[in-house]
Image (tube, helix red, strand yellow):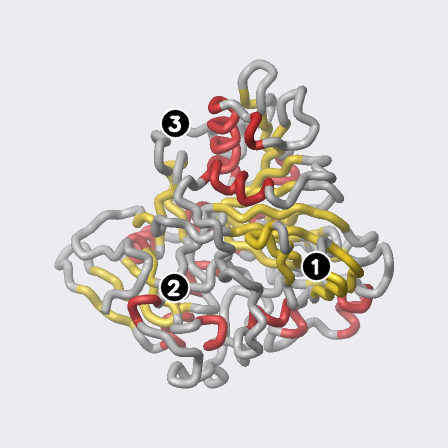
Amino acid sequence: MPGLTLVPTHDHGHDHGHDHGHGHGLSFEPLADNVRQSSRIGAEVHLPASMPLLDVSQLTEADKDVLRQALFENQVVVIRNQRGIDPTLLPQLAKVFDSTASDVHSAGPKAVSDPKNILSAYKAGRIPRAPQVGIIGSGRFKDYEGIADLEVVHLDHTLFHETPLSQHELDQGYTRPYRWHMDTPFYERLPGEVTILHAVQVPELAKQKLKFPNGPDKEIAAGATAFFSGARAFELLDDDEKEFALNTTVTYAPQAYEYIRQCRATEDGLTIPTVGRETPVDEVSEWSWDKVAEHPMVWRNPLDPRPFLQVHGCCVYKLCTRDPASGQVRVVDDVAQVRKIVYGFQRRIWAAENIYAHDWKEGDLVIFHNRGVMHSITGQLAQYQYGEHQRRLLWQCTMTSGKAPEAYRKYAGVNETGFAKI
């Protein structure tokens, strides 16, 4: 983080008794243990007493330092009761965490509309007076923010999973994560440090449930955004797996979201179990290797000494792994094998105690560390999209960073440019 020095962090997940902050300025406190569980995620930020609605221009440098500490130690933070903020605030806020952030949404200057790209299915809009801010959700809205007829689509797992939940399970209130991801196109633009979400309207619906292969179900709000920590995912690896991950670089598929458009995922939304539905790379939109994303498998992040396993398991294409003893590099370029290795590292995170699912309240302003967590939408909302009080509307701001993710382990030849070596 430009201008920041690494400082000792608080004991992650165990220092919950009081606010962190200074006097009457901005402060934060981690969420309760029964909410965080083993996720290592979640804190609530309290604005200065004189600031009911966030105003970035009025934050002191000390306030900004505390805000950065809150986020980078807890990965997801919420500021409550922010109904009435201006959308132009979101890009200003993003730059508190990354001074190199561009003024362009990480998906590009305009919302993705090309049907060849799986991301177009969301029908996400953009706010005309704040084009860095996307509009996501479920339902149709008239004359919203200068848009005469806005329709946004909440994608659910039935559209992307190889074996969706049965109708009986859906009737019982079960749901799944759609697809775990970071906010980045994996082409031409670098992942933003943070993503900011603001809840404008939250559906008034009964709770839903996540089912896990082992252990109890997890009750979540309908339309909750789910997160897991890359640091927690790394903790769950054994010593040999950690060593492999620390010495490995991940290359993503060219035009990754076109490449996987016809693919289907596992029931946890972490990977694609079969090969054969991929769009051939010579049939996706024009591309060149020097713009294809390539990142270390394990990242070093600001204000946090922990290693973060940060991999998008559905979009992986190739691994280059180095033997630390000999320095020899082995390339794994069979996509099925690449997915198998990555899934083997990530699948154990899928347990109730490791998942934080944000229970949205209208007015919530949530900042999450896009380079420290994976996230997914959840919820079966399609049948409710036309109900006046059952629609969902969120603002989303994630902007391309000017700096590439940093490898946790430095070694000769490690690629930290963010893009594939030609």
**SS at mark 1?**
strand
Up-down: is 32 above or below 332? above
In the image, 232 versus 359, the foreground residue is: 359
The residue type indicated by label 3 comes to Pro
Give the quarter of the image for residue 126: bottom right
Label 1 neighbour load within 10 Å: few <14, some 14-19, many 20+:
many
Up-down: is 70 above or below 106? above
Earlier sequence position, callout 3 versus callout 2 = 3
- From the viewer's perspective, tell me whether residue 58 is left or right of residue 309: right
Q: Which residue is mark 1?
A: 137
**SS at mark 2?**
loop
Label 3 neighbour load within 10 Å: few <14, some 14-19, many 20+:
few
Residue lying furthest left? 326
The residue at the point 81 percent across, 68 percent down is 383
**Dividing the image into 4 quarters, which one contains the N terminus?**
top left
Residue lying furthest right? 388
Q: Is residue 393 visible?
A: yes
In the image, 64 versus 169, the foreground residue is: 64
Q: Residue 371's spot in the image, x, y percent?
A: 44, 49
The residue at the point 24 percent across, 65 percent down is 421
* Distance between mark 3 and mark 2 Cα atoms: 34 Å
The residue at the point 72 percent across, 41 percent down is 363
Select label 1 or label 2 by which is in front. Answer: 2
**SS at mark 3?**
loop
Label 2 neighbour load within 10 Å: few <14, some 14-19, many 20+:
many
* Distance between mark 1 and mark 2 Cα atoms: 26 Å
- From the viewer's perspective, tell me whether residue 367 is left or right of residue 380: left
Using the image, tell me which numbered label, if any, was put on residue 17: none
Q: Which residue is mark 2?
A: 188
Select label 3 or label 2 by which is in front. Answer: 2
Q: Which residue is mark 3?
A: 8
Q: Residue 3's spot in the image, x, y percent?
A: 35, 32
